[in-house]
């Protein structure tokens, strides 16, 4: 664990107010210590160490292959030089510890509790809260139509790893459906023309976008069109994990 980094992250998130329009989220600036953030950028895995998301079982085979993942699992970390493997393993562990899971849960407690108090959005069966973290790289040609996350998702946290401030347009966008009252329990990606983009959380250095999954939390990514553009993101997600498989997750 990186204790000083952990303290900085939680202080930055704690000082950032929760916004409930169009759905519950926060956008945090300077979320990592400056020098540590520069070290993160310098230690990103080389391109050959990433895999297409479709090749690691996260999505279907026809998913856009411009989205790549470095999972942080032992078999992935083993591809790195020992110094880099130790760094990322330690950072993933900093985020996935029980203390941080509880902290994020408490930050969004009202929205999370409200969601699971609703019979239409509560999950069946006994579940615990688990966490996972991984690196994503979106290359030219990537886009993601408006959608809501899977029912098992509780909070999505995107730590933007932008190298400069010149690509703010590559951030994740929020959408409202043209059809009033339309919601989705999660899964399908919808055409952009069925929605209105309400805002984009700018893809800026050392920032965090985190939001609660609901059936109306539509979000997506406009096309990454320039061949020189890419999005590097450290994902941290809270998920509802069936109690029967919870042993493999970090849980409160």
Image: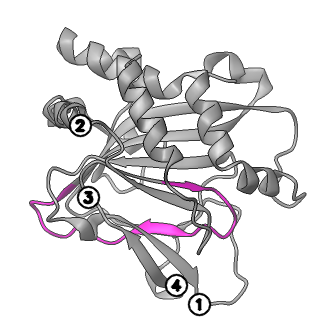
Comparing 74 with 97, the one in front is 97
Quadrant of residue 201 in the image?
bottom left
Look at mark 3 in the image and give the residue it sits on: 204
**Which numbered disc, 1 or 3, marks the residue that appears first in the sequence?**
1
Q: Is residue 220 magenta?
A: yes
Report the magenta residues as a range: 210-230
Q: Which quadrant is home to the N terminus? A: top left
Mark 4, residue position: 195
Res. 171 in view:
yes
Q: CA distance from mark 2 to mark 3?
A: 12 Å
- Image quadrant for the C terminus? top right
Q: Residue furthest left?
A: 228
Disc 2 target residue: 37
Main secondary structure found in the magenta portion:
loop
Which of pointers 2 and 4 indicates the residue nearer the eye? 2
Per the image, label 1 sits on a secondary structure element best described as: loop
N-term-proximal mark, 2 vs 3: 2
């Amino acid at each position: 664990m990186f204790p000083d980094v952990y303290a900085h992250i939680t202080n930055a998130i704690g000082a950032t107010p929760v916004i409930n329009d169009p759905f519950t989220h926060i956008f945090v600036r300077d979320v990592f210590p400056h020098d540590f953030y520069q070290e993160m950028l310098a230690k990103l895995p080389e391109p050959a160490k990433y895999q297409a998301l479709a090749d690691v079982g996260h999505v279907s085979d026809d998913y856009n292959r411009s989205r790549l993942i470095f999972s942080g699992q032992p078999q992935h970390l083993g591809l790195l030089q020992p110094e880099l493997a130790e760094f990322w393993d330690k950072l993933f562990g900093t985020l996935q510890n029980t203390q941080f899971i509880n902290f994020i849960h408490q930050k969004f407690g009202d929205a999370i509790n409200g969601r699971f108090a609703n019979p239409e959005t509560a999950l069946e069966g006994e579940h615990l809260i688990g966490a996972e973290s991984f690196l994503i790289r979106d290359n030219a040609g990537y886009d993601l139509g408006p959608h809501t996350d899977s029912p098992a998702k509780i909070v999505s946290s995107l730590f933007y790893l932008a190298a400069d401030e010149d690509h703010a347009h590559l951030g994740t966008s929020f959408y409202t459906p043209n059809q009033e009252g339309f919601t989705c329990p999660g899964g399908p990606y919808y055409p952009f023309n069925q929605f209105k983009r309400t805002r984009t959380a700018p893809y800026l250095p050392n920032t965090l976008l985190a939001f609660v999954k609901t059936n109306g939390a539509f979000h997506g990514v406009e096309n990454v069109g320039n061949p020189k553009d890419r999005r590097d993101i450290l994902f941290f997600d809270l998920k509802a994990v069936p109690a029967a498989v919870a042993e493999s997750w970090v849980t409160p």
